[in-house]
Amino acid sequence: MKRVAILVETTRSYTRDLLAGVSRYLQQHGSWSTFLELRAPESAVPPWLSGWDGDGILTRTHSAEMARAILAAGVPTVELRSTKHTPGLPFVGMDNALIGQAVAAHFLNRGYRRFAAYTLDTEVFFQERVSNFVTHLKQAGASCALLPARGETSPRDWEAHQANLIRWLDSLEKPVGIFATNDQLAVRLLDACRRAAIAVPEEVAVVGCENEETLCEFASPALTSVRFDGLTVGWRAAERLDRMMRGE
């Protein structure tokens, strides 16, 4: 029986769907002995990994330190988050080009002709989502206003951030469709709209990304978001790793 470590955070809707996809694959194609622990994106490198005698790894790698530990294990590995830290590994994940295109088509099909994006540049996949959103709009003859997100570390920072966001929203000609790079940013947008008495979706329509259920349901009004197909990603990643462990 193959021994597989699954280094995937369990804190998000998408990653839980991803794990369900791995489970479905194993139910139909034979079991592995799996090591799965509760993890968050900021979880440290597991201390047992340096001496682990296993056969394969499924990972969502969030740091260079984790990447070094995974590569040092020397076993077949499939990356499920980004190739930023693990460029030499096979990758299974969502197509960010299609995500940006889908959101643009969503707004255009509903008659919007003014657009904006609330952006984040901390990851390449965030940049790809917005870049392809803007490109698709340009092909349709439309322009797009951009606001880069700022971080916040205290209530005072948060208040200043939201005040800046409200000023930006007030400056936009309405009605406008706004794409938020992820659901956290989309929730910030909805909060700013509430504070500024801007009607959603009559004046500002917001679409998030990743469909994090806790955030989408907590938001007021409930957030529209691009849902990732974690089940298929998990299935295909498990299938790929299975083949690699057989020497293919």
Image (tube, rainbow, N blue to C red):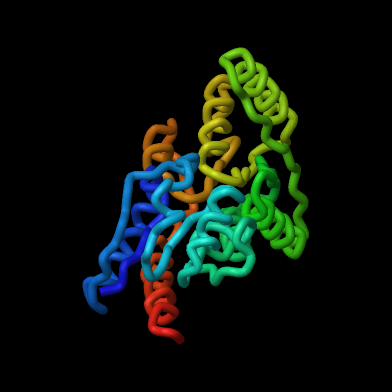
Looking at the rendered image, the quarter that the C terminus falls into is bottom left
Looking at the image, which is closer to me, 23 or 47?
A: 47
Any part of residue 158 in sight: yes
Q: Nearer the viewer, residue 131 or 29?
A: 29
x 56%, y 20%: residue = 195
> Residue extending furthest front?
51
Is any part of residue 109 visible from this angle? no
- Image quadrant assignment for residue 142: bottom right
**Which residue is at the far bottom?**
248
Q: Residue at left 61%, top 50%? A: 64
Between 153 and 57, the one lying in front of the other is: 57
**Which residue ends up furthest to the top in the rendered image?**
156
Height in image: 94 above or below 168?
A: below
Looking at the image, residue 173 sits to the left or right of residue 90; the answer is right
Task: Choose top left, top right, bottom left or bottom right for residue 176.
Answer: top right
- Count of number-bearing discs: 0
**Depth check, front residue: 230 or 67:** 67
Q: Is residue 221 above or below residue 97?
A: above
Where's residue 207, x and y in %? 54, 46
Residue drawn where x is 49% and y is 53% of the image:
226
Give the side of residue 176 with respect to residue 234, left or right.
right
Residue under the point 63% across and 51% down: 126
Horizontal and vertical percent for residue 117?
67, 44
Q: Left of 77 or right of it: where is 2?
A: left
Q: Is residue 245 above or below residue 33?
A: below
Residue 128 x %, y %: 67, 57
- Residue 220 coordinates in the image, percent (x, y): 43, 31
In the displayed structure, 159 sits above or below 209; it is: above
Quadrant of res 171: top right
Q: Quadrant of the N terminus?
A: bottom left
